[in-house]
Image (cartoon, helix red, strand yellow):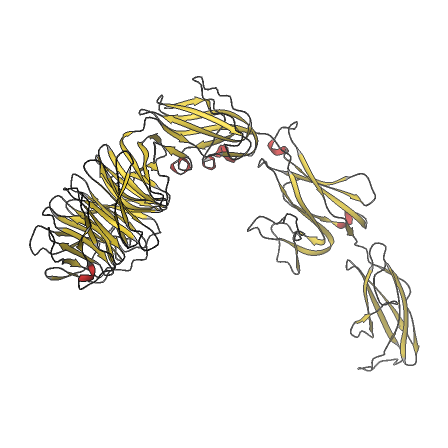
Amino acid sequence: MMRRVLVAGVMVAASLLPGFLRAQGTKLWNVNSYDEMEKGSTSGVAIRSDGQIEAGPATSLLYATGKSYVWSLGADAAGNAYLGLGGTAAGSAAVLRVSPDGKETQIFSGKELAVQAVHVLPDGSVLAATSPDGKVYRISASGGEPAVVFDPAMTEEKPKYLWDLAVGKDGAVYVAAGGPAVVYRVPAGGGKAEVLFKTTDQHIRCLLMAPDGMLWAGSDGSGVIYKISTTTPGAKPFAVYSARRREITSLAMDASGNVYAAGVGTGRAPLPPLPVTGTTSVTITFSAPGSASSVGSNTLVPEGSEIYRISPDGSPMKLLTLKDDVVYALATRNGALLAATGNRGRVYRVSTDGSGQFSDVAHLDASEGMAFASVKNGLLVATSNGGKVFRLGDAVAADATYTSQVFDAKEFSQWGRAEVHGSDAGFELFARSGNVENPLMGWSEWTRVAADGSVSVPSGRYIQWKATLHADGALNAVGLNYLTKNIAPVVDEVVVQPGARVPPPAVSPMNATVQVAFPAASSGAVNIVPEPGAAPLLAQKDKTALTVRWLAHDGNGDDLRYSIWYRGVGEQNWRLLKNRISASYYSFDAARLPDGRYELKVVASDAPSHTESDALTGARVSEVFVLDTTPPVPGVLEAAMENGKIHAKLEARDATSPIARAEYSVDAGPWQYLEPVGKVSDSQAERYDFVAAVPAATTPVADANEHVIAVRVYDRYDNMAAVKAVVR
């Protein structure tokens, strides 16, 4: 259903709508996709992968440890939580018992870095596995010194890490170890540990004990999921699935016997034959289970996570790929599959039917969701960075609130109608606005959108909306219209390049070229450059032309048109050279203007995007430049023979710019540099008085006493005039 309401114009994901791209008139900020909804903040709200928001599970903080890491979590029948802590220094390993009312008691401390796994036994005692170089301890419910259940130092393999624990029906304890990858079985009541199986993987990272006594294990290194019966004597391990990710971080099972696995990491090489050692030895060669389109291939995929389902018949299916999240824990609850992730502290509810749908059901106030534990009326979630425990209830939140991101209209704006897609009832919408980015700094109060759609929100630059959702409420999109106040365009820089012409788009290959570029900004100034990736303006050298280039912008994003005006230095009136220019440069024949010193003014107008009465302009004047297309005027070249050499005199003048250089040639010989009287060539009039040697004739001539001397004079803008004299 769609409902139109008048809300201060808010729009998220605006870039998806054509209306957002319009430069003029009313624009729309529209929040209508999962990615855009994810930019907001939630409290008891679920964000579905199709972009719909609805009331989600009630989430609350049970306990904050004040530490950085809670690595593992368990719970007993009374609802007490058991937290496995760790840190970066030896002696950080500890286990806390936290009651349902949030009161804590430390029941264990060790010399190791971390408690990687905890498991609560039916008698109330707790198993704790520590790492690195740790042990498995049994912590009695009645207190006392913890008892060592398993010491890897006493085994042949001596693994460095203990990752997970599982307990069989007979009370036997199963330990997942790494460095090397081994699963141990410790008999109920104690006794010598035995190797259940080991692999050439690097670690066995997680365990899952099924109700029928089947033990499931996930590896790190090759990303393989194994299963082995713990109730059948002499059972052999079986590799059920080879994931595309290198590490299986968690396993979970639902009431129907489906097993769910989370895979993370990349870089796994194709698997060689993998020996698996148990009571007897067997070699297992892995191949991709299922069809060719299943997830069993060895194709490398980007960082992130994948979640898989293995059906009771053994067939695998990839349920979901998360590009930006690492799944650390999985749990099933009331038929739903939940995933705790990092590094944004998200909890997802994942569809198990293979549709790829999911919902973001909790934004935890921590970076990583590490572990789940089931309690009455919900789940507990342990987190790291910071180390906390949250409640995730089975019931939906009574006060579910979604708050959008702050929208920046870029300019002072009038807020208009809101367009809301969702249920007919079950939610209330509010809005607030301001002129600074932080809503806590002088914004308006939240204003509820009335039944007739009206809302009173002051005009400003920023706006935000929020929705309060009830059990029957849902929102698919919220779009808010707004009209920015028109502001004048700005011409940022103007560069004039005499002697350059930009050719039309279709031209034959040119010879010598010159780039018309913007100068570097001086210290403390804004560095104005063309758009990143934009090619420099390539112009052809042409003494008869002049090119002007400029940079301009409009804060409203309006289309701009330009006009160019000129005036001579000392003149008061500007005269139009060219108008209705859409490009950011203009080349013209320099002969249109007499030689002299000029300024150019570029005027930018947003008239294409506004009515004539609303259109605004901005302008910038160039630096003074000299237009000089006329060559110097040389006087009479006086030349005579003196002592076998030519003595020559010449005076040259230029009406606009200084004489830059001169050169001479005798009898069509090479041109030689000619120094003026006074040596420095810096005036509009220069005199030359020089002696030139007469070259020897290389071919027969009619009159050996006749010679020709030529002089070329250039002004500063490379205009040239030549004169010659015959000497006998």
Q: Quadrant of the C terminus?
A: bottom right
Q: Is residue 701 left or right of residue 506?
A: right
Q: Is residue 123 left or right of residue 398?
A: left
Q: Is residue 519 above or below residue 405?
A: below
Classify residue 334 by image quadrant: top left
Q: Is residue 633 visible?
A: yes
The image position of residue 51, as x and y in percent, is 37, 34
Q: Nearer the viewer, residue 721 or 449?
A: 449
Q: Is residue 458 above or below residue 373?
A: above
The image position of residue 437, as x and y in percent, is 52, 35
Q: Nearer the viewer, residue 263 or 692?
A: 263
Q: Nearer the viewer, residue 707 or 690?
A: 690
Q: Residue at the left extreme?
A: 233
The image position of residue 178, as x and y in percent, is 24, 58
Q: Quadrant of the N terminus?
A: top left
Q: Is residue 297 above or below residue 461?
A: below
The image position of residue 386, as x and y in percent, is 36, 44
Q: Is residue 143 above or below residue 2?
A: below
Classify residue 610 by image quadrant: top right
Q: Residue at the top extreme?
A: 452
Q: Residue at the front extreme?
A: 144
Q: Nearer the viewer, residue 653 or 341?
A: 341
Q: Is residue 289 visible?
A: no
* Label tally: 0
Q: Is residue 159 left or right of residue 229?
A: right
